[in-house]
Image (tube, grey):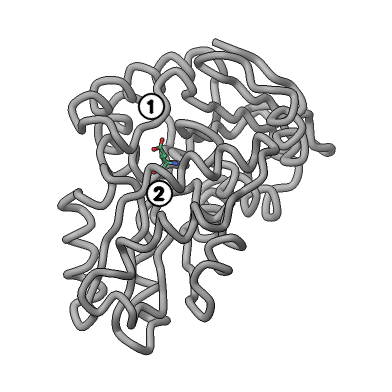
Amino acid sequence: MHPAAPLLFFDSGVGGLSVLGPTRLLLPTAPIVYVADSAGYPYGTKSDAELAERLPALLTRLVELFSPRLAVIACNTASTIALDHVRAALDIPVVGTVPAIKPAAVASKSRVIGVLGTEATVRQLYVDDLAARFAADCIVIRHGSPELVAIAEAKLAGEAIDPHAIAAAVRPMLAQPRGAEIDTIVLACTHFPLIAEELGLAMPGVTFVDGGPGIARRVAWLTQGQAWPDVAPVGIALFTGAAPSPALARSLDRFGLGTIATL
Ligand code: DGL
């Protein structure tokens, strides 16, 4: 494996940064290409058919452009709907993002857990299956929130966050039967760990679990023994739609993504 071969991170927007962050801790000099499908954002309100058609074609094009050693679909919506299609289309390892229901079920004392994702993710049979396999003795309360995705995007774009907007976004989850007993919440959208602090203020005492650190370990394991550069190269952030604002570009730079490009 050539040391310059990058890891490719993919999301609809900035959410994948919550997976890139922990990965950088384990693989500090890995060359990174981060792709935000801003032309397709948001994914969470799209149909399964639309995403299943869009993602394999787009990922195929990106792999042709960057020849990555591995791709991380750092998006729960894309992974729960299209991971198999993407894997079938590519000839490199593809790591997906699975809602962290298993560790949440282990952590919960009240045995009532929340799954906070996009509308598209929380309706997937895949989530039913995870709940049945790993949280059979828990009540699993799901909620899809496009508002929280937009709030995370706004935060990274340097905008102030209104705590009332966060509280309003999570209220429908807490208002469901037994919702007040939730003690552990799966952040089943990669955008949400980016606003974990604000979510914590809206729901004091609740533990949040996300897949980022687990995915990072998986990437490190799959690339074990491969050569990396001695010094971290400047990472690339590629947008499929309009270029990011200067404030968003500054946030990306904090994640080591100093080169901005558009498709
Ligand atoms: N970050 C994405 C996820 O993990 C999707 C957000 C969106 O585009 O709706 O589900």
Residue to which mark 1 is pinned: 91
SS label for mark 1 = loop
From the viewer's perspective, is 19 left or right of 168? right
Q: Of tags 1 and 2, which is closer to the observer?
A: 2
From the viewer's perspective, is 38 left or right of 60? right
Q: From this view, report whether residue 144 is shown above or below residue 240.
A: below
In which quadrant of the rendered image does the N terminus lie? Answer: top right
Of residue 120 and residue 150, the one placed in the foreground of this image is 150
> Outermost residue toward the right?
231
Give the quadrant of ligand 1: top left
Q: Which mark is residue 97?
A: 2
In the rendered image, residue 191, in percent from the top left (x then y), is placed at 50, 46
Return the disc, 1 or 2, that comes first in the chain's sequence.
1
In the rendered image, residue 102, in percent from the top left (x then y), is placed at 34, 70
Q: Is residue 195 visible?
A: yes
Residue that appears at 23% across and 63% down: 130
Residue that appears at 58% across and 34% down: 7
Quadrant of the rendered structure where residue 5 is? top right
Q: Which amino acid, mark 2? A: Thr
